Image (cartoon, rainbow, N blue to C red):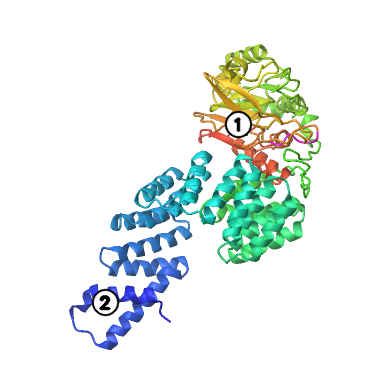
């Protein structure tokens, strides 16, 4: 049966078609009607390539106006499904030109700007849509894009506004719940997602609540919600729901069930990059390198729109790791339920480089290719101020990292343990002077860290942090650390394992105002943690500079129940991988931490290096 909408559009076509200049028989009219209806169906629903052909024919036949704009949006959607974001953007742009007051076209166009990674343009399109029609839907869409960008405060404001406009908007409660999750307020996150599920029993809401349980370390409850998401999912949502459940099963060590989920997802969407990479990681953990490599290669070649969760970059890094000839480090399965929000079991470091330095001839070759490399390594453990609990792991972490740098051929490595502010200032000044004659300058810091009014600080062991104190006089800002490495000729690298929450609340002052730095940790966990706020803040870097956080901005890092943090373990086990360039090395570190913490902690790298030269901690043999 021909849809009513198709009949109406066919009738409009008959009104305007040039062929109607001559008389038509009723049979001619019936044939035109059927042909247009068929093209309309093809434009709307056929596989992307056929949809594009049908929509193009309709565009050519239809004069300027609302109907033609609609065909442009449908063709643009099909271009996007094929991964051609530029053509999608062009088609939506033409639709908006033809119908500038249609907020739906503006709202839909944002997804293709986002598919190119242009979140600013996507947000701008949605802002214009809100100007035309400030409804709950448009606020929700902009909130989702702001959250993707990491602008959680503005995202929350959009979701709040959407809920005020439409208190029954389940999608708004879902979005706000995920913002609470990313802020570490899991109680509010669960409350909002419970409301979303009560309003609308949709697969996506169960999946979102499952992600909160997983962030809390409760994989059993996460799996229960993901089971429900799969049970009630549609053809559109099932591939992602299956892949997400596969990830949880992989974290738990249930590899056969994980493979089953990835296989089902790929039956429905053969190029789905998340499922390809997830299955590759599962095969890798099972020791099946051949199948793992094949899936990673398919993920890299996939034309799937967007790089969901950085799956393509993970696949590239994994292939580089295979090419190095070095076996991946062992990562034990995560517990079904963590002992606390900041708790994670951590094994001993398995890194031969700590006891077996590179051969002298390889070190000489590294010096010739990479130049002079220097490092300042800091581990602050014993804090003097009662507001700063002493830590266990930073000293161990710093000693392991210093040994690593020495054993891979760094010409100068300075290790500071339990450094006061004067010692840190002196060490950074020395580093600044030495960096002028170095090619690489690296600072690694493990210890307490804090963000106050948008400024990130390392906390010396003698810092007097408390009410009314000025962090500028107590801490060492990230800007000061960046200045110390700025003179290096090739690479300026700062690595901060200081994104840990503390199980206390402390008030500190920056400039004339006081900033309340609240704890998201658990006082009864018994595990010391390393940041007085909810992680460190986002950082802007330029030039040949990298800043690596143990956990991305706004997120907290887990300290680990063993002798080292999960991040330090991954760092030491991966940096000596031969022949893997530095960006892929930090991707491997990121992925290993994600595996070890069941996705609860995601290291993040800011900045970029010049593309004309590859840099290696250890060159290929």
- The one of 159 and 453 positioned closer to us in this rendering: 159
Q: Nearer the viewer, residue 416 or 125?
A: 125
Please state if 620 lies on the left or on the right of 91 as rendered: right
Q: Give the range drawn in magenta.
A: 557-562
Instruction: From the image, tell me which residue sits under label 2.
Output: 14
Left or right: where does residue 231 sit relative to residue 609? Answer: right
- Density class for disc 2 (Cα within 10 Å; few <14, some 14-19, many ≥20) is some
The label shown at residue 553 is none
Label 1 SS: loop
Say whether marks 2 and 1 touch (CB < 8 Å).
Answer: no
> What secondary structure prevails in the magenta region?
loop
Q: In this view, does 84 lie above or below 400?
A: below
Residue 554 image position (x, y, % from top left): 59, 36
The reply to whether the magenta stretch includes residue 222 is: no
The quadrant in which the C terminus is found is top right
The correct choice, above or below, for 436 with respect to 218 in the image is above
Residue 404 lies in what quarter of the image?
top right
Q: Position of residue 452 (x, y in %)?
A: 57, 26
Question: Is residue 570 shown to the viewer in this render?
Answer: yes
As helix, strand or loop, the secondary structure at mark 2 comes to helix
Q: Which circle marks residue 536 in the picture?
A: 1
Name the image quarter holding the N terminus.
bottom left
Residue 449 horizontal side relative to residue 540, left or right:
right
Q: Which residue is drawn at 29% across and 76% down?
A: 11
Badge 1: how crowded within 10 Å, few (<14), some, or many (20+)? many
Instruction: Between residue 165 and residue 596, name the one nearer to us.
Output: 165
**Residue 320 visible, this orientation:** no
Q: Where is residue 244 in the image (x, y as percent from the top left)?
A: 65, 55
């Amino acid at each position: 049966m021909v849809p009513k909408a198709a009949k109406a559009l066919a009738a409009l076509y008959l009104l305007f078609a040039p062929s109607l200049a001559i008389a038509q028989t009723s049979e001619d009219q019936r044939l035109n009607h059927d042909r247009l209806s068929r093209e309309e169906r093809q434009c709307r629903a056929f596989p992307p390539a056929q949809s594009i052909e049908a929509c193009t024919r309709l565009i050519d036949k239809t004069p300027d106006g609302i109907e033609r704009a609609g065909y442009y949006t449908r063709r643009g959607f099909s271009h996007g499904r094929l991964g051609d974001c530029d053509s999608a953007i062009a088609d939506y742009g033409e639709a908006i030109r033809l119908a500038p007051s249609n907020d739906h076209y503006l709202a839909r166009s944002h997804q293709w700007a986002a598919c190119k990674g242009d979140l600013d343009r996507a947000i701008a399109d949605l802002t214009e849509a809100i100007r035309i029609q400030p409804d709950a839907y448009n606020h929700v869409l902009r909130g989702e894009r702001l959250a993707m960008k990491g602008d959680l405060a503005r995202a929350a404001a959009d979701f709040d506004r959407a809920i005020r406009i439409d208190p029954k908007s389940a999608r708004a409660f879902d979005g706000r719940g995920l913002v609470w999750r990313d802020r570490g307020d899991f109680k509010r996150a669960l409350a909002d997602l419970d409301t979303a599920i009560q309003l609308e029993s949709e697969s996506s809401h169960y999946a979102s609540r499952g992600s909160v349980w997983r962030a809390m370390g409760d994989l059993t409850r996460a799996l229960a919600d993901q089971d429900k998401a799969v049970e009630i999912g549609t053809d559109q949502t099932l591939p992602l729901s299956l892949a997400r459940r596969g990830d949880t099963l992989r974290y738990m060590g249930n590899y056969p069930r994980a493979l089953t989920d990835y296989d089902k997802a790929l039956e429905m969407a053969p190029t789905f990059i998340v499922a390809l990479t997830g299955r590759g990681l599962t095969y890798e953990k099972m020791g099946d390198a051949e199948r793992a490599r094949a899936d990673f290669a398919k993920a890299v070649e996939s034309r799937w729109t967007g790089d969901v969760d950085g799956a393509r970059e993970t696949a590239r890094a994994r292939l580089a790791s295979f090419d190095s000839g070095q076996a991946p480090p062992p990562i034990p399965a995560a517990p079904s339920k963590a002992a606390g929000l900041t708790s994670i079991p951590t094994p001993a470091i398995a890194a031969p480089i700590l006891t077996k330095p590179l051969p002298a001839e390889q070190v000489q070759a590294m010096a010739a290719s990479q130049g002079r490399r220097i490092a300042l390594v800091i581990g602050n453990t014993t804090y003097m101020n009662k507001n700063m609990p002493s830590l266990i792991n930073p000293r161990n972490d710093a000693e392991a990292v210093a040994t690593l740098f020495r054993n891979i051929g760094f010409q100068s490595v300075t290790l500071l343990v339990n450094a006061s502010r004067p010692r840190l200032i002196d060490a950074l000044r020395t580093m600044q002077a030495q960096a002028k004659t170095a090619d690489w300058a690296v600072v690694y810091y493990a210890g307490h860290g804090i963000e106050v009014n948008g400024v990130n600080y390392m906390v010396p062991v003698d810092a007097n942090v408390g009410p009314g104190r000025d962090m500028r006089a107590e801490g060492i800002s990230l800007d000061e650390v960046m200045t110390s490495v700025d003179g290096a000729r090739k690479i300026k690298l700062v690595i901060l394992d200081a994104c840990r929450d503390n199980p206390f609340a402390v008030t500190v002052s920056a400039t004339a105002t006081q900033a309340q730095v609240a704890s998201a940790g658990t006082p009864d966990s018994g595990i010391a943690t390393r940041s007085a706020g909810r992680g460190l803040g986002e950082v802007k870097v330029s030039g040949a500079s990298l800043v690596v956080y143990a956990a991305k901005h706004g997120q907290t890092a887990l300290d680990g129940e063993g002798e080292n943090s999960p991040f330090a373990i991954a760092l030491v086990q991966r940096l000596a991988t031969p022949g893997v360039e530095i960006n892929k090395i930090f991707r491997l570190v990121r992925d290993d931490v994600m595996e070890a913490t069941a996705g609860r902690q995601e290291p993040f790298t800011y900045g970029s290096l010049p593309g004309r030269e590859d840099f290696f901690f250890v060159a290929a043999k």
